[in-house]
Every structure is written in structure tokens, then in C-alpha cells.
Image: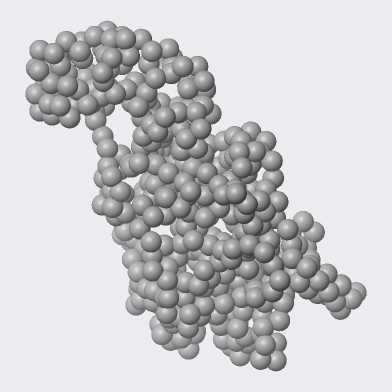
Amino acid sequence: MPDRQPTFGYLTPERLPLFTDLYELTMMRGFDEAGHEPTATFQLFVRDLPPDRGYLVVAGLEQVVHYLESLSFGEEAVSYLAQQGFPEDFLDRLADLSFSGEVRALPEGELAFPNEPLVEVTAPIFEGQLFETLVINQVGVQSLLATKAARMWDAVERFGDGQALVDFGSRRAHGTDAGLKAARAAYVGGFDGTSNVAAGEAFDVPIYGTMAHSWVQSFPSERASFEAFVDVYGDDSVLLIDTYDTVDGARIAREVAESAGVSLAGVRLDSGDLTALSKTVREVLPETDLFISSGVDEFFIREFFEDGGIGQGFGPGTALVTSTDAPKLEGVYKLVAVEREGELAPSMKLSAGKVTYPEQKDVRRVSADGQFVRDVLAERGEEGLDGEQLLEPVFEDGERVAALPSLDEIRERTRRNLRSLPTEHRRFRSPTSYPVEVSPGLSETTDRLAASLRERES
């Protein structure tokens, strides 16, 4: 049996273009050999939001940008495709491929709603077709998880008092890359940091960590474990106090700190009735920060505060990195315009349940008194419409024209946008649908094209 390639770090820049579905390459070969090379516009969007979601936080654009800037079929990728039977002329073209088109997108941290383009790619169809798999993957998963994180931040915003949120979910993520992207998405959604060191280094976000139960269990007694930890970390110590009995653990932590002459940075509660225990521990440790983990999500946070729970921070894990209550986002990447006789012409699907709006588009947001009122989905450049245009140019003629904001700037955009979204659209259960209108121009084009296609195919 031949040696297998290692899985960690396998997708080098030279191999990354292979992260695509075979039918993309099959179509690209067909385009090439048929001499069918029109310019085309593809749009990534969602037809529907996941259950109990009133909005979507856009995330993942930065990874798409890096992909397009580094697009290159390396020697190993070309060699593998040769083994799959692709002809030499096609492989030579792939070896020389680089992105030459235009990208417009909603900025990361923007709020999006059904049918609004998250990313719009206009390029020769040979290029644009290739990107479908990766663009859906990168923007889809990060937007899903950033939205979950934003709901937790919103729970703190509305029911708490500025408590910290730290991603604890790497070990439960669906793979190493998923763990890294979850940490990034959590920060975009409003979190303060992550427990994952690699994510901290990769994305320059703060990292946090204390101790596990194994630390406590490895010592002869809980007191001895606390004494050893405090001896090393002093005032920076955060002790996990529920290995045996949470209230006894709090009392021992207080005694150890007093004996060592330190002020504990905090204690962590990770099991039991966390709301009730937080109140009791506060009585034992009135000046110490309480950090709450285990089963934390937006529903837990709201109920925790409504029931009088006390804490200065939360560590969501599984619920965050898997978006447990709504674990999928049905992103689609569809062709909406294609070159006919030298001009881009609208194109659309008429499949039952999967009708798409044609044309390059604008997304305009109408606000009043600092609150979002409605969005308008319009034809690109359509005049006479109210609202702020949200889609921004990212690439022109294959060159990036937009600066990449810092994650702090993106996170602030998310928080600002959530504060501007009326609370009925932010409810955790059965939110009111945010209004997205279709402009007169786009409505007319859609109806005209649909009628023409039905007549042509009848």
C-alpha cells in the first residue's frame, strides 16, 4: 500500500485549487474544448435562513480573497489531474491559470438576508465555474458560525452586562480547519477570544486558558493542586473549582489565595446547576470573577441572567462550533448573467423551489433613526432607489482593490449592525422576517425573462 499524504496542512496554495468538485473541472474542460468562453456572473446567496435565524452575519470573505490572489495549479495538482485522464492541453491551461475577473461582496460583519448576494463573481466562465465549491465552503461555514456567535453576543448585550465570551469549541469542531475557522468566525460574531493557540497565531486574536480537571486530579488533594497552580501563576490564576464539590472548591480556593497573598483572577464553573452555583460561589468569593462553561449558548445565557445567575464570562464550546440548533447553511452559487453577443444578458433558473433572480445586483439598505427598516434587492446601477449600497468592489480585472479590514474592525461592524437591527428580527425563537423588497427593475427583468424562457422551452 502506498504511503498516504498527511492530512494536516495538505491544502498548500498549489493544491488548494483541487478543493473543488469534479464536475467543475469536467465543465471547464468542456468549455475549453468547445471554445465556449463567455464572461459570466455567479452569485453566492442563501434562499432561506436556518431555523430561528432572523439574519445572517457575513464571514469568510478574507479566505476567498487569499484564495483568488494565490490561485495556482501547482505541479502536484496538475500531475494528479493527469492521472485522472485530463488531456495535456487542458492541464497546460490550468498550470497558467490566474484570476482575471471582478468580485463584489458584502463586507464581513454585514448582516444579510435571503436572496442577497454575499459574493458576486464576474469572470470568464472557465474561471468563475471553478470557484463554486471553495466559495460556498469558506463563506458558508464561517457565516453560519459567526451568526451563532452573534446570537450569544446579543444575549449578553441585551440580558447581561458586557460579560466576556471565549470560544472553547476546537475539540468539538469537525476537523482542525473547522476549529480554526470557528474561532475566527466567533470573533467576527462578537467574541473576545479563543482557547485555541493556533487560531490566536493565525488570526491575531486573544487567547485564553486556565486548567483542566486533570490538573486537579493529578495532585493528592484539591488544595494541593490549587496551591501548586497559584505558586506558578499568582494573581493571574484562574482555578477550576468543580472537580469534586463546587462550593467546597470555592472555599478552598479562597483559603489558598489568602494564604498565598494573591488575588485570584477568577474561578471557572463547569458542571451542575450553574445558575444556582454561581450565586453561592459569589457569596464565598465576593471579589473574584466567575467564568461559566459547559453547555453555553444564547438560550443558556438568556436564562442564566433571567434567573439571577452571576458571572463575568462564558466559554461556549460545542453549541458554537457546530451551531447545534441549526447546523447547516444552504448556500448556493448560481449563474445570473452570461455574455451574449458581447453583452452580459440576464440568466435564471426556473426549477421548482429553486427559482433564482437574474442579473448583477445591488443591495440597498434603508434606515431610519439608526434602525434598519428594509433592504431592496435591485439590478446593478438601478436608479431612483433609496438606501445605502452594501455590495463593495473587491477585485477589478483580477487585481484586489479593497483593503482587508482587521478582525477588530469586522467585529465592531457586526456589533454595530446588530444594534441597528430591530429586536423583533433578533429573537432567538421565531424572529420576525426582515423585509427584503425586490426593486421595480429587477421584478420586470425577472418576469420578462421567466416568460421568455417558458415560451422558448414549451
In the rendered image, residue 378, in percent from the top left (x then y), is placed at 69, 67
- Count every numbered label the image shows and give the total: 0
At horizontal 61% and vertical 42% (from top left) the residue drawn is: 422
In the image, residue 372 above or below residue 235: below
* Residue 336 visible to the viewer: no
The N terminus lies in which quarter of the figure? bottom left
Along the horizontal axis of the image, is 228 left or right of 313? left
**Given the current orientation, which residue lies at the most extreme front position?**
369
Q: Position of residue 302 (x, y in %)?
A: 51, 26
Is the image coloured rainbow, by chain, by secondary structure, or in one colour?
one colour
Q: Nearer the viewer, residue 180 or 146?
A: 146
Task: Indicate the quadrant containing the C terminus: top left, top right, bottom left or bottom right.
Answer: bottom right
Where residue 445 appears, x then y in whole percent? 78, 73
Q: Quadrant of residue 125?
A: bottom right
Which of the two residues, 361 or 122, is positioned nearer the viewer here?
Answer: 361
Q: Is residue 188 left or right of residue 225?
A: right
Which quadrant would residue 389 be assigned to in this image?
Answer: bottom right
Is 332 situated above or below 200? below
**Horizontal and vertical percent for residue 425?**
63, 42
Q: Residue at x 38, y 65 (%)?
A: 404
In the picture, measured across the screen, residue 250 lies left or right of residue 231, that is right
For the point 44% across and 35% down, the residue is 318
* Above or below, 339 relative to 19: below
Residue 308 visible at all: yes
